[in-house]
Image: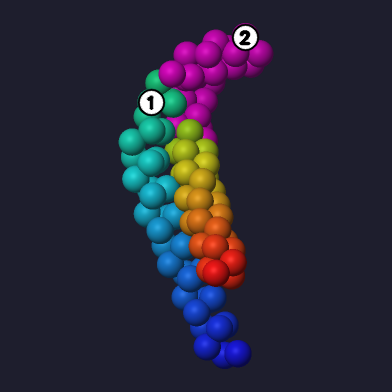
Amino acid sequence: MSNSNSQSDALKKATGLLSAIVGILATFLFAPQFYHASVDWVLAYASSQYGSGWDPLIQFFWAIICGLAAFGIFSIIVTMAVRLGLARLAALSLNR
């Protein structure tokens, strides 16, 4: 029983590490693209609602939001893919 728990903990740690690494890499690659594709719209919306004096602050926070969103989305995708893949392998091994 203890061996099963230690294997499960090791698997969770490995999955978390893998998802964090992929999340960081994806953030580096895709957050700037998302930022540049959306910042003009965000600035136009913010200017129409709050005035144009907030532009530098909004750009700063929008960059942070884009980075966090990219990290979170890709981390969740990798975690779910690993868990679903392992569940599929477990189901296949039980059917043999």
Q: Which numbered marker is on residue 45?
A: none
Q: Is residue 17 above or below residue 36?
A: below
- N-terminal of the pair, mark 2 or mark 1, is 1
In the shown orientation, is residue 28 left or right of residue 62? left
Marker disc for residue 48 = 2
Q: Locate residue 49: give its quadrant.
A: top right
Question: Residue 32: x and y, percent?
Answer: 37, 29
Q: Residues within 10 Å of mark 1 (few under 14, many from 20)?
A: few
Judged from the image, the secondary structure of the residue bearing numbered disc 2 is: helix
Position of residue 95 measured from the top left corner of the image (x, y, whole percent): 59, 66
User: What predominant SS class does the magenta segment belong to?
Assistant: helix
In the image, 11 versus 87, the foreground residue is 87
Residue 69 against residue 33 in the figure, above or below: below
**In percent of the image, x 44 and y 55: which residue is there?**
19
Q: Which residue is mark 1?
A: 33
Range of residues picked out in magenta = 37-65
Quadrant containing the C terminus in the rendered view: bottom right
Q: Residue at x 38, y 33 (%)?
A: 30
Badge 2, how many Cα within 10 Å: few under 14, some, many 20+? Answer: few
Q: Are marks 2 and 1 in contact (CB under 8 Å)?
A: no
Kind of residue indicated by mark 2: Ser
